[in-house]
Image: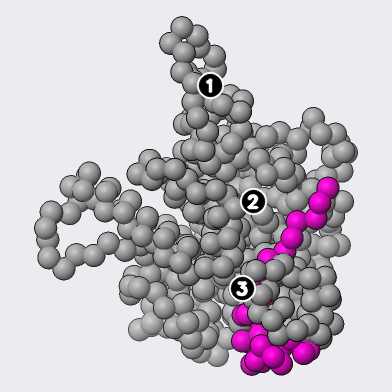
Amino acid sequence: MATQKLYAGVKLRELRTRLGLTQKGFAEKLGVSLPYLNQMENNNRPVSTGVVLGLAQEFGFDVAELSTGDAERLVTDMREALADPVFGDTPPLADLRLAASNAPALARAFLELHRAYCQSHERLASLDEALGREGTSVQASPWEEVRDFFHYCDNYIDAVDRAAERFSRDGDPEQAATRILSGLKITVDLQESTQVRGFDATTGTLHLSTLSAPSTRRFQLLHQVALLTQNELLEATLDLARFQTDEARAIAKIGLANYFAGAALLPYRAFQQAAHDTRHDLERLADLFGASIEQIAHRLSTLQRPGAKGIPFFFVRVDQAGTITKRHSATRLQFARFGGACPLWNVHQAFETPGRFLRQLAQTPDGVRYLCLARDVSKSGGSFSAPVRRYAIGLGCEIRHARDLVYADDMDISNEAAFEPIGISCRICERVDCHQRSVPPLERKLRVNPDARGILPYEIDR
């Protein structure tokens, strides 16, 4: 099989700029000519093996970063956007990859334009806005803007992660949080309440609900500590993000405080080592760190520190309608921005088997194979009359990492027939024989025979 050429011009330029080097100085350190470096930075030539070795030896650069990052996410997002019937012929996949690699800012601008179009169309259809109202503008909703911020940061915020790790270096993070709050003359009050967390600045009282699980109370305690003691760091991070609205900035601040809480509860190096030692056994890790299964799964997907990366995982949470409420992928598998996940994926079956881990060997249309885990994470309201929130989480990695996961034991990963076909979104999935297809694929022609009917009311050209 031919080795795929690596085009990483944007990454090379970013690294050179970060190091403060001119093209000439960078080329000299890598042992290549100036024209050759220029061609690589403009994606006219692939990155050579010698340059890859030079990056690692001369600068200690994690070369895995050259083949990861925004490009695959942008390609997936553009394919999904172009599945909109408003577009005509779809550009070839090679062109989309070229745009994502060479002009990522232009690709993001296209996605913003399409999102603006979709929101405008929805507003008009539902009459949410009066036609012709002055001063209106279409932009991403605050929630979507924040979701995309974390998505394109690889769900790893280095400064916040390291600050949380320093916070927990002297022992139990809950005890450290209690000491800090007492030093700030803040009292922690446990009470039976439907409000998970509430802080009264006038009385200096932090209320935590006894109806919440212990892991939730610990997390909320650390969240409040982040808001009180890490405000300068959080605000500086928000300044760099340049959100369009105050609402997006406020939502992102909550997200960053959540990030700090999770990283303090599960400190990077200690958690990474424990994950390795337990072979990523989620239940054992939850017991070791006093965390929930969802917190453990989410944290595993954030272990993307340069030079100390963990196994690249994807993580997703879905509700009973199949809507994705949380998503992140450090793998090549990217989730649909709109709608639900592929119905063939085992995460949808988790609601049928509460309290159990489901395992699945799966293969995406690009030929990449994954080990997928799924489990329900239903959350009680704390009383008989309180509603139960029902979710399912999915966690997975490429099959080449299977030996490092306890969940792969006794699975026949060498058997091609054991891998189930899954996709991302029906409109961009090229499988022609899927029995769960909801809409036709964008890039294939259809044949319709009124006198014959199979599983689908049409046939897809192969």
Magenta region: which residues?
Answer: 1-29
Q: Is residue 192 magenta?
A: no
| Residue under pointer 2 | 333
Q: Nearer the viewer, mark 1 or mark 3?
A: 3
Whole-percent x, y for residue 230 in the image? 53, 85
User: Where the C terminus falls, by quadrant?
Assistant: top right
Sequence order check: which comes first, mark 2 or mark 1?
Answer: 2
- Left or right: residue 143 versus residue 399 is left
The amino acid type found where label 3 is placed reads Asn
**Predominant SS along the magenta part:** helix
Residue 84, labelled with which disc?
A: none
Vertical side of 1 occupied by 203: above or below: below
Sequence order check: which comes first, mark 3 or mark 2?
Answer: 3
- Left or right: residue 325 versus residue 18 is left
| Residue under pointer 1 | 459
Whole-percent x, y for residue 154 in the image? 60, 66
The amino acid type found where label 2 is placed reads Leu
The amino acid type found where label 1 is placed reads Glu
